Amino acid sequence: MNIENIEAFVYVIHYGSFNKAAEILFLSQPSVTARIQSLERELDSRLFERVGKQISLTDEGKKFLPYAQQLLQTFQKSKIELKQKRTLPNELRVGCTVSVSNYIMPTIIPKLKQKYPDVKYKLTTAPSEEIINKVLSRELDVGFVRNISHPNLLSAKAYEDPIRLYVYEGHPFIGKDSLSIDEIGEYPLVFFECGSLDWMRIHRLFASMSQPPNIEFQTDTLETAKKLVLSRVGIAFLPSLCVEQEVKEKKLFPIHFQEVSGISLQTNMIALNGENGLWFNHALDLCKGIAQSIQDQI
């Protein structure tokens, strides 16, 4: 059965005349008539009653209409799907920072795989500057990096990860309504150092203290900082995503401290302008949804 004949039939019904359908389909009116007649021969049924310039569906036409609409919709959806697949590479090369690699990609990749089952994924973990350079040189298709701006890059905020003070089970801060910076500074601190402006703001919180804070441990990895807190050797300011599971299991506890409200790590998705837009937009929506669902639980 010719899909063009079905298309002509549906358009004649939708627009109420052969002439209007011909105009929309960029055909002549005799061409539309010929397609309808061909369809009627295929079905061995009259589909229209014609009285002068007026047309109406026959009983057979009314029965066939929902099937014709469904066939046309299915055909159009298949064209969109095939076009969509042609715009995607066989392999997507994704660059991400350590925190994204640990806490976001294990959730987002399976969802992308469901949406694009034929695409293979290659993940690279590196600092933001290296990822940016690799995207610019087309060694990576997309990247997850700190908030940046570059004229040759498409960049959009994927999520913001609030930084909060976390303590271990049984710590005296649990249940306290308010804390001062001096109280926090008296306890052993674990400091995660990543060099971003957000962490410099945490450092500045202690500038007003008469005595320097009791920083006993400094590390450049979130996992190490988190495990030191779990080991009860100190407390730490940490991004919320990295402790989501431990908070659920009540192994770590967020402590409200007004001075850190509004301090967060922003992660952006980047790609070269004009490239991988389809995947970029879908991954961005997924990432935002996942981050929000995690934040709602913390």
Image (spheres, rainbow, N blue to C red):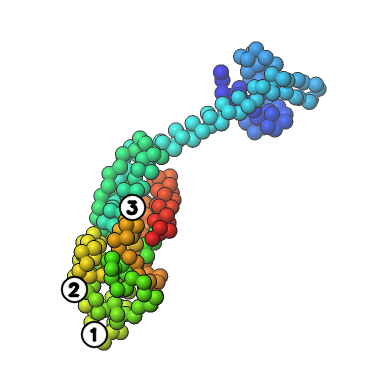
Q: CA distance from mark 2 to mark 1?
A: 14 Å
Residue 158's label in the rendered image is none
Residue sitting farthest toward the right: 52
The residue where tag 1 is placed is: 211
Q: Name the image quarter holding the C terminus.
A: bottom left
Residue mark closest to the camera, 1 vs 3? 1
Answer with mark 3 or mark 2, whichever residue precedes in sequence.
3
Please say if the residues under marks 2 and 1 sit with CB atoms less than 8 Å apart: no
15 shown above or below 131:
above
Graded by Cα atoms within 10 Å as few (under 14), some (14 to 19) or many (20 or more), the crowding at tag 3 reads: some
Tell me the amino acid under the disc marked 2.
Glu
**Is residue 151 shown to the viewer in this render?**
no
The residue where tag 3 is placed is: 104
Quadrant assignment, res 266: bottom left
168 shown above or below 37:
below
Element under label 2? strand
Residue under the point 56% across and 20% down: 2
Tell me the amino acid under the disc marked 3.
Ile
Element under label 1? loop
64 horizontally vs 119: left or right: right
Graded by Cα atoms within 10 Å as few (under 14), some (14 to 19) or many (20 or more), the crowding at tag 1 reads: few
Please say if the residues under marks 3 and 2 sit with CB atoms less than 8 Å apart: no
Q: Work out whether residue 120 or residue 259 is closer to the camera in this orientation and state it.
A: 259
Residue under the point 43% across and 45% down: 278
Tell me the amino acid under the disc marked 1.
Gln
The residue where tag 2 is placed is: 216
Answer with mark 1 or mark 3, whichever residue precedes in sequence.
3
Residue 174 at x, y = what percent?
33, 71
Residue under the point 34% across and 80% down: 180
69 shown above or below 285:
above
Q: CA distance from mark 1 to mark 3?
A: 38 Å
